[in-house]
Amino acid sequence: MNLPEKNIPVHHLTSEEFQLSTLQTGHPENFNDIHRHNFFEIIWFGEVQENSSLELDFESHKLRNGQICIIAPGQVFNMKLRGEKGYVMAVTREIFKEACAIESILTGGTIPFSLDSESEKTCKSIISLIEQEYHGPLRLDLLKTYLRAFCIIIAEQINLQDSLQKDRQRIQELIILIEEYYTIHKDTDFYADKIKISSHHLNDIVRLSRATTVKKMIAQRLLLEAKRELSFGALTVKEVAFKLGFSDASYFSRFFKKHTGQSPDGFKSGNG
């Protein structure tokens, strides 16, 4: 639904620089169909319903328990509350900029993201302190300090999840590259150069996500193709070796036996 900007109401922070409320109270000025803010809003969804979702810049995001969303000034936001529980912090641009130094959040907020259990525990403690202060002495400097602590923790989570997303993309890229080049390039450096990271970093990513190494991934692909050719092809062992990029048939035989426990000839006759 593309509404002209002038028709989208803008909500303002009026009497306070910092407001804390809960989703249970369902502040009508914060959740009233489609709207924009002239301030930053941090929403922490403690408990959501099965069909809970929000719209941010006309894109719908399904919600899960414990997720946090940061809405930047000017972003178009829409959510109908259905009994969700959680916290809402409305913060002026000036205060939020003091608390959070991540440029991407300052300019575009964040879509809903999750916290790991340790970070969630820490953030719960910080929110509890914010709540006590907000409903008690209301010392703005102390609220700013707590908010900064909260932002440090969630920024770490955002950076970590961005990093994991990049790593998943790199693994996909590596799989595609191996499929294309495994018979020509059998060294990790080639693939690392193509992905534009160091060999050490690439191996770290592969080790963490797949519990293996780049070299072993290439070897597995070579073995799969070797077994296919030896089982169903009409090529000799020597021809299979050359087809798979081995300059020496005896080296191919050693490679095959090391990984399978069988010689290529033995495997071929056993599957012939």
Image (spheres, rainbow, N blue to C red):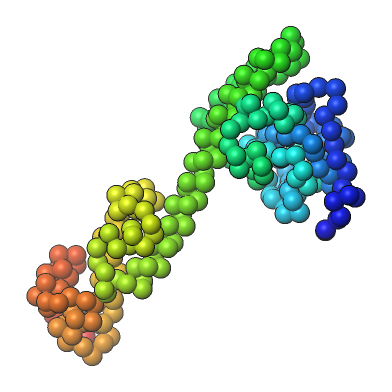
Q: Residue at x 74, y 16 (%)?
A: 134
Measured from the top left, where is residue 100 in percent x and y? 61, 31
* Quadrant assignment for the C terminus: bottom left
Would you say 89 lies left or right of 238 here? right
Would you say 159 lies left or right of 134 here? left
Quarter-of-image position of residue 219: bottom left
* Quadrant assignment for the N terminus: bottom right
Please tell me whether residue 42 is drawn above or below residue 231 in the rendered image.
Answer: above
Measured from the top left, where is residue 253 in percent x and y? 13, 74
Question: Of 197 and 119, which appears nearest the observer?
Answer: 197
Question: Of 226 and 164, which appears nearest the observer?
Answer: 164
> From this viewpoint, which residue is outermost toward the left?
250
Q: Residue at x 63, y 26 (%)?
A: 98
Q: Residue at x 55, y 40 (%)?
A: 158
> From this viewpoint, which residue is outermost toward the top?
137
Would you say 75 lies left or right of 246 here? right
- Residue 253 can be seen, yes or no: no
Q: How many marks?
A: 0
Measured from the top left, where is residue 20 in percent x and y? 75, 25
- Residue 102 can be seen, yes or no: yes
